Image (spheres, rainbow, N blue to C red):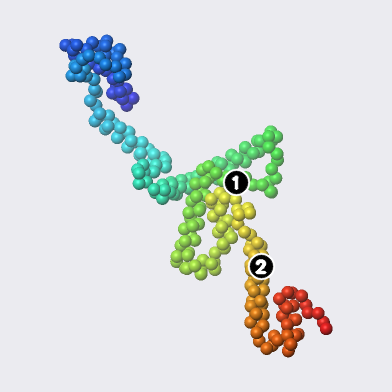
């Protein structure tokens, strides 16, 4: 296609033999120059093969598309109405097709290669020795991300299926929220350190909320009893001291 395209891009002017315009005048004229002559005496050589080139161009595009589909290349639809959801669905389809292959490559090739590379760098003293029982190399980027994306979609679909078929009550009864959050964060490649509250932090916040609720309840009860004859300080001063001690947390002083 390069040779026909170069021939079609070549610009050649023709001048009629009986024209008063000289070829040299036309060749030496600059852009915007004025020369004498008639427009009918001057023409441009045209290849006239546009339709043939269009046929070859369409064939090239079709072959390129078929090769891209055969090699699973991400090819979203090129149009003004292409949405982000359409591109995401195309990407998900590609991940489903390549997830198993790349998961196998991660296990069979990437992890052994990483271990061998780290061993070589450790022997050559380029990196310090890594304790085997404390540090474990993990691939979290590159082609392994496709497998993690497939795991994320499978986990979300599993949780959604349980919620739709068995109801939210069964989801709350049988699912472990902490583990679900950890797996979703791992599938997204997100570090949850200081991001997700631990169980100890949630228990402490729950205890603080219960204590605040109990104090509010005691305050409300004391306000309701304040207008009763039992709370009259002239008739029953011991009860007033007991209520104040419960609210403030200080034991009553013995008389």
Mark 2 vs mark 1, foreground winner is: 2
If the image is split into quadrants, where does the N terminus sit?
A: top left
Which residue bears the numbered disc 2? 208
Is the residue marked by circle 1 packed among few (<14), some (14-19), or many (20+) residues within 10 Å? few
Name which residue lies at 73% across and 85% down. 233
N-terminal label among 2 and 1: 1
Name which residue lies at 64% across and 65% down. 205
x then y, percent, for residue 219: 66, 76
Above or below for 120 versus 35: below
Taking the view exactly as shown, the residue that stands out farthest to the front is: 234
Q: Nearer the viewer, residue 244 or 43?
A: 244
Q: Nearer the viewer, residue 80 or 200?
A: 80
On residue 138, the disc is 1
Would you say residue 96 is visible in this rendering? yes
Mark 2, secondary structure of its residue: helix
Is the residue marked by circle 2 packed among few (<14), some (14-19), or many (20+) residues within 10 Å? few
Name which residue lies at 74% across and 78% down. 245
Taking the view exactly as shown, the residue that stands out farthest to the right is: 255
Q: CA distance from mark 2 to mark 1?
A: 39 Å
Mark 1, secondary structure of its residue: loop
Name which residue lies at 74% across and 74% down. 249
Q: In the shown orientation, is residue 50 left or right of residue 196?
A: left
x then y, percent, for residue 129: 70, 40
On residue 236, the disc is none
x then y, percent, for residue 229: 68, 88
Image quadrant assignment for residue 255: bottom right
Q: In the shown orientation, is residue 87 left or right of residue 38?
A: right
Q: In the shown orientation, is residue 78 left or right of residue 20?
A: right
Above or below for 156 versus 229: above
Taking the view exactly as shown, the residue that stands out farthest to the left is: 18
């Amino acid at each position: 296609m390069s040779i026909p395209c170069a021939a079609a891009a070549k610009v050649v002017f023709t001048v009629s033999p009986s024209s008063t315009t000289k070829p040299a005048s036309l060749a030496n004229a600059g852009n915007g120059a004025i020369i004498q002559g008639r427009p009918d005496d001057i023409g441009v050589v045209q290849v006239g093969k546009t339709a043939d080139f269009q046929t070859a161009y369409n064939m090239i595009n079709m072959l390129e598309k078929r090769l891209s589909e055969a090699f699973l290349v991400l090819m979203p639809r090129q149009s003004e109405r292409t949405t982000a959801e359409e591109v995401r669905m195309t990407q998900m389809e590609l991940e489903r097709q390549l997830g198993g292959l790349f998961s196998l490559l991660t296990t069979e090739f990437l992890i052994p290669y990483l271990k061998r590379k780290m061993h070589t760098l450790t022997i050559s003293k380029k990196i310090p020795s890594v304790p085997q029982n404390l540090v474990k190399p993990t691939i979290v980027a590159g082609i392994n991300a496709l497998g993690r994306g497939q795991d994320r979609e499978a986990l979300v679909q599993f949780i959604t299926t349980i919620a739709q078929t068995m109801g939210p009550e069964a989801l709350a009864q049988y699912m472990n929220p902490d583990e679900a959050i950890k797996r979703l964060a791992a599938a997204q490649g997100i570090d949850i350190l200081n991001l997700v509250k631990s169980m100890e932090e949630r228990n402490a916040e729950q205890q603080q909320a219960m204590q605040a609720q109990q104090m509010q309840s005691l305050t409300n009860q004391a306000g309701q009893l304040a207008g009763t004859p039992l709370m009259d300080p002239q008739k029953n001063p011991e009860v007033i001291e007991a209520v104040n001690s419960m609210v403030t947390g200080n034991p009553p002083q013995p008389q």
